[in-house]
Amino acid sequence: MKPFLMAVALLVIAAQAHGQTTPLAKYSSREEYRACFKEEDALKAQKAVFSEQTKAHGANLKRVQDELQAHVATQPKPGQADDAAVDAFNDKIDALNARVDASNQEAERLNQETRSLNAKVAALNQRCAGMVVSHADHVAVLKERAASGKQK
């Protein structure tokens, strides 16, 4: 009798699970799908510009660091240099430090831009990554993009 009750219990559970259906996903429109690609393209362009700015900043920072290191190597020895040489050395250090400060400000701007760009990418992913579109809309948008020279 126990196996029979167990079988009945399993059938009841299976029937309940079978009765629960998940609702169908809402299809996004072709315009919404197209807008996601357009925003993705804009973000890619911004990322490319940002990448170039980051490279330029890194190269500039390296130049300043190299100049600073080379200049420190020319530091006058105590007791062997006159006041004019020490003043000239200190003036150059001040100028290099000003360039380092400017580079640090640029680095902070780039960090803020990184956070902003990352937030935009996250918002795009949130909005578009799980998008459900009909096959016809998918094919149509991809054909439009191919015709305009865009990929994907």
Image (cartoon, rainbow, N blue to C red):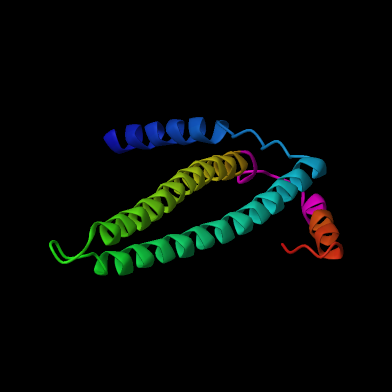
In the image, residue 90 sits, relative to residue 105, either above or below, namely: below
45 or 132, which is in the foreground?
45
Write the residue at 46% across / 48% down.
102
Q: Nearer the viewer, residue 33 or 97?
A: 97
Left or right: residue 81 compared with residue 28: left
Which image quadrant for residue 70?
bottom left
Q: Position of residue 137 (x, y in %)?
A: 81, 50
Location of residue 26 with respect to 48 vertically, above or below: above
Q: Residue at x 29, y 58 (%)?
A: 84
Residue 137 shown in magenta: yes
Residue drawn at (36%, 54%) of the image = 91
* Rendered position, 132 above or below 70: above
Q: Position of residue 4 (x, y in %)?
A: 34, 36
Q: Nearer the viewer, residue 7 or 119?
A: 119
Residue 102 part of the magenta-drawn span: no
Instruction: Work out which quarter of the rendered image holds the C terminus and state it.
Output: bottom right
117 or 71, nearer to the observer? 71
The residue positioned 41% from the left and 61% from the top of the image is: 64
Residue 98 drawn at (x, y percent)? 41, 49
Left or right: 64 in relation to 25: left
The segment highlighted magenta reads 127-138
Left or right side of 115 for 34: right
